[in-house]
Image (cartoon, rainbow, N blue to C red):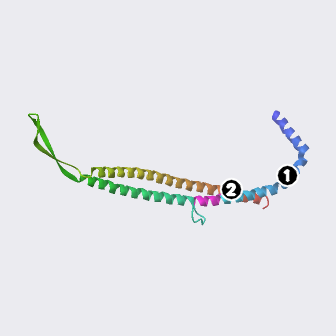
Amino acid sequence: MAGLTSFFKAIKWLWDHGDQFVPLLETLPQILHAAGEGMELAGQGAINASRLLKGGGGVPANARQAVESAADAVDSCYEQVLLVKGFIKSAGDEIDKVKVPTVEPTFVNVLGNQVVSGLTFGSSSLFGLVADALQDGATKLNLAAQQLQTQATQLHDLSDTLNDAGTDLGTLGTRLKQSGQTLQQVTGG
């Protein structure tokens, strides 16, 4: 019963203050028409923003394309760094193979004196420090290549996200524009 009482109170309030609503009701079609125009413009703006994000509609450059190009460039750098790393590692391996013969005497103690008792033949790396430096450089290049690969993957993911956002924004813009046009038609536009 309380709901019915509230309803009657609302009707009485409208009856008592109805003359205040007449100007609003008279201008309501123009207000709704202007709102429809605004919706149509906002929808077109969203469509244009969508094209800047993902392309289409005659837009020559877009964010997705720029990010994808950057990702491709980083991918290419990754491949080149891996090639250089391989060359440097191979050079280090080959330089490390260059050996020089060594001769080491062996001694025995005879009556308190050291006497040569024989010779031990061996070899040692002539360029050991250079080979180590090249191997270290190859390791660092490999780490740099891994970072490039990570960045390329993230850029490709960002490109996909921009494409999805552009698609969604375009759909939203189209619907908003259509709603604005419909509202204008309903209000006499």
Q: Which residue is mark 2?
A: 176
Q: Residue at x 46, y 59 (%)?
A: 73
Number of the label disc, if any, that sits on residue 137: none
Residue 14 horizontal side relative to residue 143, left or right: right
Q: Secondary structure at mark 2?
A: helix
User: Reading the chain from its start, which is encountered first: label 2 or label 1?
Assistant: 1
122 relative to 81, above or below: above
Q: Position of residue 121 (x, y in %)?
A: 15, 47
Residue 31 horizontal side relative to residue 174, left or right: right
Q: Residue at x 12, y 45 (%)?
A: 119
- Mark 2: few/some/many CA within 10 Å (<14, 14-19, 20+): many
What range of the chain is rendered magenta?
A: 46-54
Amino acid type at circle 2 is Leu
Q: Residue at x 36, y 50 (%)?
A: 139
Number of the label disc, if any, that sits on residue 24: 1
Q: Residue at x 67, y 59 (%)?
A: 45
